[in-house]
Image (cartoon, coloured by chain):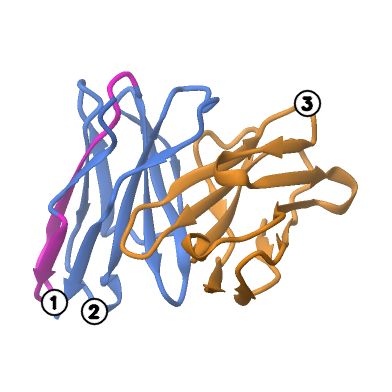
Amino acid sequence: KAGVTQTPRYLIKTRGQQVTLSCSPISGHRSVSWYQQTPGQGLQFLFEYFSETQRNKGNFPGRFSGRQFSNSRSEMNVSTLELGDSALYLCASRLRDGSDGYTFGSGTRLTVV
Amino acid sequence: AQSVSQHNHHVILSEAASLELGCNYSYGGTVNLFWYVQYPGQHLQLLLKYFSGDPLVKGIKGFEAEFIKSKFSFNLRKPSVQWSDTAEYFCAVKRYNQGGKLIFGQGTELSVKP
């Protein structure tokens, strides 16, 4: 089966701009989670969506938001970008009970200049 | 706050050496436990997981991990490492009532010398 697909792979943005990242989960997976990976903070949970509803949210400012569509695809938006938002953003999908674990995509590398 | 601690930041081994990477978590309730591996330039891949039952779980590529509830630990082991095991290893914990939220350790970078 196809894996988790994230687009774009790389992105360069200027401070103050906004950005939208996309994630297509594995077919049949209805839960999508987002994580931020940085060398200093490691992997940190951003939020999770299931059936178009946000189920859980990490400790990130309101500039970070997301949504999920009826086909389970998800988008993440970051507004008013800051230099510290430079990171690898990972998306993971799973079956509802998570019994098969969480499958991660290759990520979107965001660089804010 | 719940945390996940990985004891070693960087481990260097020679091929055929045995590996044990430590992982401890601070939450006392029911948890699901995971080890992920991230090879250079690649995405996170699931090595193994523990949900319930036998505390000794076997994963892919010869890895195994033992869940010791009394010690809040989930250490990863491999009897004989190969150069291709060079990667970063992450332990992750999911609390029973927190949906899909994984809390990751800081990661352990493993370098295997040929």
Subunit of mark 1? A
Marks 1 and 2, Cα distance to the nearest angstrom? 6 Å
Looking at the rendered image, the quarter that the N terminus of chain B falls into is: bottom right
Counting from the top left corner in percent of width and height, residue B49 is at: 61, 38
User: Contact (CB < 8 A) between labels 1 and 2?
Assistant: yes
The answer to which of B86 and A16 lies nearer the viewer is B86
* Residue at x-position 12% and y-position 53%: A8
Q: Secondary structure at mark 1?
A: loop
Locate residue A101 relative to residue A83 in the image: left or right.
right
Amino acid type, residue under disc 3 in the picture: Gly
| Image mark for residue A95 | none
Q: Say if B32 sits above or below A40 in the image.
A: above
Subunit of mark 3? B
| Image mark for residue A83 | 2
Q: Is residue B31 visible?
A: no
The answer to which of B81 and B96 lies nearer the viewer is B81
Chain A shade in the render: blue
Counting from the top left corner in percent of width and height, residue A31 is at: 38, 29
Residue carrying label 3: B53
The residue stretch that appears in magenta: A9-28
Residue carrying label 1: A15
* Residue at x-position 78% and y-position 26%: B53
The answer to which of B73 and A89 lies nearer the viewer is B73
- The answer to which quarter of the image holds residue A23 is top left
